[in-house]
Image (cartoon, rainbow, N blue to C red):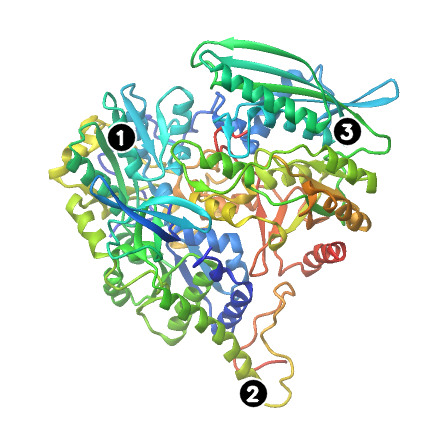
Amino acid sequence: MCLGIPGKVMEVREEAGLPMGRVDFGGVRKEACLAYVPDVKPGDYVIVHVGFAISQVDEEEALRTLELLDQMGDLVQQELATMGPGMSAPAVLDDPVAGSAPPQRGGLAS
Amino acid sequence: MKYLDEYRDPVLARKLMAEIHRVTTRPWTLMEVCGGQTHTIVKQGIDELLPEGVRMIHGPGCPVCVTPLEQVDKALAIAARPDVIFTSYGDMLRVPGSATDLLALKARGADVRIVYSPLDALKVALANPDKQVVFFAVGFETTAPANAMAVWQAQQLGVDNFSILVSHVLVPPAMMALLGSPSNQVQAFLAAGHVCAVMGWTEYEPIAERYHVPIVVTGFEPLDLLEGILMAINQLEAGRAEVENQYVRAVRREGNRLAQETVFRVFEIGERKWRGIGEIPSSGYRLKPAFARYDAEAKFDVGDIHTQEHPACIAGAILTGERTPLDCTAYGTLCHPQKPLGAPMVSSEGTCAAFYAAGRGIGVPARPLAMAAPAATNAPTTPIEGAAR
Amino acid sequence: MTDLERPVAGTTIDADGVACPAPIPEVERVILGHGSGGQLSAALMRDVIAPALAAVAPGGPLNDAAVVEIGGLRLAFTTDSFVVSPIAFPGGDIGELAVNGTVNDLAMMGAVPIAISLAYVIEEGLPFEELRAVTASAAHAAARAGAPIVTGDTKVVGRGAADRLFVNTAGIGLVPDGVAPAADRARPGDVVILSGPIGLHGVAIMSVREGLEFEVEIESDTQPLGGLVAALVGAVPDVRVLRDPTRGGLASALNEIAQASAVGIAIDEPAVPIPGPVQAACEMLGLDPFHVANEGKCVAIVPPEQAEAALGAMRALPEGAEAVAIGAVVGEHQGMVTVRTIVGSERIVDMLVGEQLPRIC
């Protein structure tokens, strides 16, 4: 019930005095009330909860989050690479299944 | 799905998990508030792969599950009336009251209908002028704007056969009640992203300061949860206690002003009981006097239903992290998913339901973890890879 | 501040007037959840129906059809009732569903269908046109499956006593020698194969269900699987288990197999094909695609050395074009199904407990 999912506003119209939008959720289309996001226009993304758009997705921020996350991983690798000789095995293992023990802070390998 | 799938990237997920491991030096206890967040954590097994000592306590963040027994009983009393069409969100139909539930009532012929949006309930009222339509207005602050709009529209359109049974609960008072409890073990919170999309996060700043707990507004996808946990742990490790926002793509500090205006035009703060916990002061919404004629409790005179929460239920202690379901005398006997007593068992992701599903403490072999049995997890992959080529 | 460890005492009165913990009364009536194909359905069978039939029913694991020996031949025999609402939905109608459903139950025992029966319980007021359309669909489905409809029955009941039309089909088929798939035959090391994407039927029904309507380009996947199974057993006669994941979805089917065979099943979540719109609809409604009904898919469990042959045989036909290995049978966590998540841990996938949708097949 906290379910708020992002969807793309396809068209906007008015019904009984309320702005309603036809929103596309990855191939599923449903009506949502846009009364709380009055500046939204077709092409914008909104978060919809029980038939109401409660927030507009800030697409720039969304992209930035992903970019930061992507870089973060690389930063860790870089950091480890600069730690000096003997650090041949990175602490961060890519295999999710191998049961890796958490890397120890401040150093690798016993 | 755009703005959803990207936050499920397994590679980024593993990077975040590795970073969490890298920065954690001590045990920490965190709580994610919202049921949707619990769902992701449990479904993706995030809590199992966190560093040893980092514990996630599942908060009371499912408005369905914390709906007090009393409100469910009132709903049942109203729904049983032949002149009533009782409408509700789907998940409320399965929540047990003292003696039965809405689904069972429906089986016995009551007109109980699932709706997706409160505006749909209003449509039912418009289409059935000879019946009384009641909508079970359950939810956190996230859902209040929708419920408020339905009442507002009813007034605008002059609909008089529509009313709502209010059972709204609020997050900040619950957080403060938890933090104020002497047995509280929670050291940081992941605040509910969509609650904050509506309300903003200003209410949490005094909480963070007064109780010295980091509060991170967090989304619902795996990467959101992992990033939120990372941000919280970074604060804990550094001794900081601030409100931060992980869910930047959907939440602003002031929240949704328009939504807040409508909510406070229709609702005011009032008392509310929480299932398995009891009353938390000023933790709910009730309709303002100007909208009294849309209040189902007044309309149908169910004020004489007072239900006490079950004495054996220790939901409160479960939520503070002080106890586990294994400490509960009712767990697995009086209380199980088909006949739950408190919120953590009503919700399929609640701590008690999760324990039960994993077979813990009820004589079923403990469920295996990938980390504990690497041989087991290797076995399936080999035949798949071999066969698929 | 409220002390959370104690419920607040005060002027409230316990509705039952009982001071000490008392159990909430048993549910002694059938509820919708009992028909959902999940745990409640299993409980109804185990606690109410099976005991009453014990004297005349052979024991053993519950399979999609029964196999009886007669004159040296093995005859598969099955019956199914269809109460889907609405009776026509994107991708099909109740007539087609009813015939395909029974043909598929026979196919899940490896049987070639011989004959089908078709029985109607019609609600007074149903237009002839709709009855004709449904019957034409049933005929078409039977022809496609190569199984004549040889007998039937028609009853009419008053308004409100049946939701427009209920259909029952029964079928008999012949099981070839050397073919004996059964729910209790899965063994550790076996490969779990799925014939195609899941969630289509359930989502198609939901999209036209009152109260939840949404637009989506999804159609029910109802189709006969006899041809697919024939190709499969041709390549792998010793297929261990065949099951079509209908009510209760993939999760319920796999759980039933794990329990009947006393084995564990481990699924690789990224390997399970779920179409985008199905995923989106499930997100929107808060449903798990693993619990959504399918009508033209099957799970096949085969010995590991036969997996490649099985996949090859299935992929050669349109019904199996997207067949894929999704996991394996393991010796651990007997009776339980686990799924590997994106962060690399395992979580348990339960059977559906009660009702997910009222009457979808």
| Front residue of this view, candidates B321 and C169 | C169
Q: Amino acid at mark 1?
A: Val
Per the model, the C-alpha gap separating discs 3 and 1 is 52 Å
Q: Nearer the viewer, mark 1 or mark 2?
A: 1
Question: Residue C218, percent across and down?
Answer: 52, 41
Q: Chain letter of disc 1?
A: B
Asked whether residue A96 appears in the rendered view, the answer is yes
Q: Are marks 3 and 1 in contact (CB under 8 Å)?
A: no
Residue drawn at (39%, 59%), measured in percent from left and top? B219
Q: Amino acid at mark 3?
A: Ala
Residue at the spot of label 2: A83
Rendered position, C162 above or below B19: above
SS class, disc 2 = loop
Q: Which quadrant of the figure has residue B135?
A: top left
List x then y, in percent, for residue C64. Answer: 69, 29
Q: Which residue is mark 3?
A: C111
Location of mark 1 (residue): B134
